[in-house]
Image (tube, grey):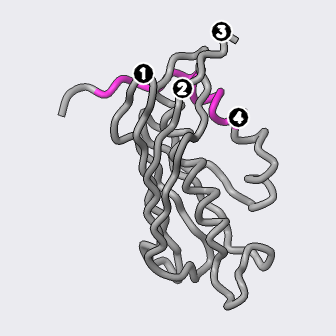
Amino acid sequence: MGNIPTLSPYVTEKINKSFSAQSMMATLGAKLTRIENGHVDIEAPILAGSLQQQGYAHAGLTFAIGDSATGYSALSLLPETHEVLTTEMKINLLAPGKGERLVARGRVIRPGRRLMVVQSDVFAIQDGKESHIALLTGTMIPVDLSKT
């Protein structure tokens, strides 16, 4: 499978600082639970304020943590001077989000210099059991901040 380079402490710190600056993630009660090269997991509780009309986790919660997990997985592979923006994201909702919390597991499918293909699986956790509720697939664009 080849050698996967170790994630630098600078990149880990950069991702943590960026995540902490997202007021949306704070509002949702979301937390980073894994940061590795090309992989980031985000968990969020299913709060009363993030439910849809039938009592399930709102698709907006599912999308928000799935999109952020893919974005940070892409950022983990970029040079220190770069940020990332979502250019396109598709979501397939597979099942209702019911349980205590959701976990989004983002990963990079294909890193590119101009576009990065990313994917995230979102699971609902209920009584310790995972249920696959969504699949997000999209593209991220690397932005070199040293050139802006």
Q: Disc 4 designates what residue?
A: 18
Which badge, 3 or 1, comes first in the chain's sequence? 1
Q: Which residues are magenta?
A: 4-18
Q: Dots 3 and 1: beta carbons under 8 Å?
A: no
Mark 4 or 2, closer to the camera: 2
Vertical comparison of 111 with 143: above or below: below
Query: Secondary structure under badge 1?
Result: loop
Image x and y of residue 124, in percent: 52, 74
Residue sitting at x 55%, y 40% = 87
Q: Disc 3 designates what residue?
A: 146
Image x and y of residue 39, in percent: 44, 42
Q: Disc 1 designates what residue?
A: 113
Q: CA distance from mark 4 to mark 1?
A: 21 Å
Name the quarter where the C terminus is drawn: top right
Rendered image: mark on residue 10: none
Q: Dots 4 and 3: beta carbons under 8 Å?
A: no
Q: Dots 4 and 1: beta carbons under 8 Å?
A: no
Rendered image: mark on residue 142: 2
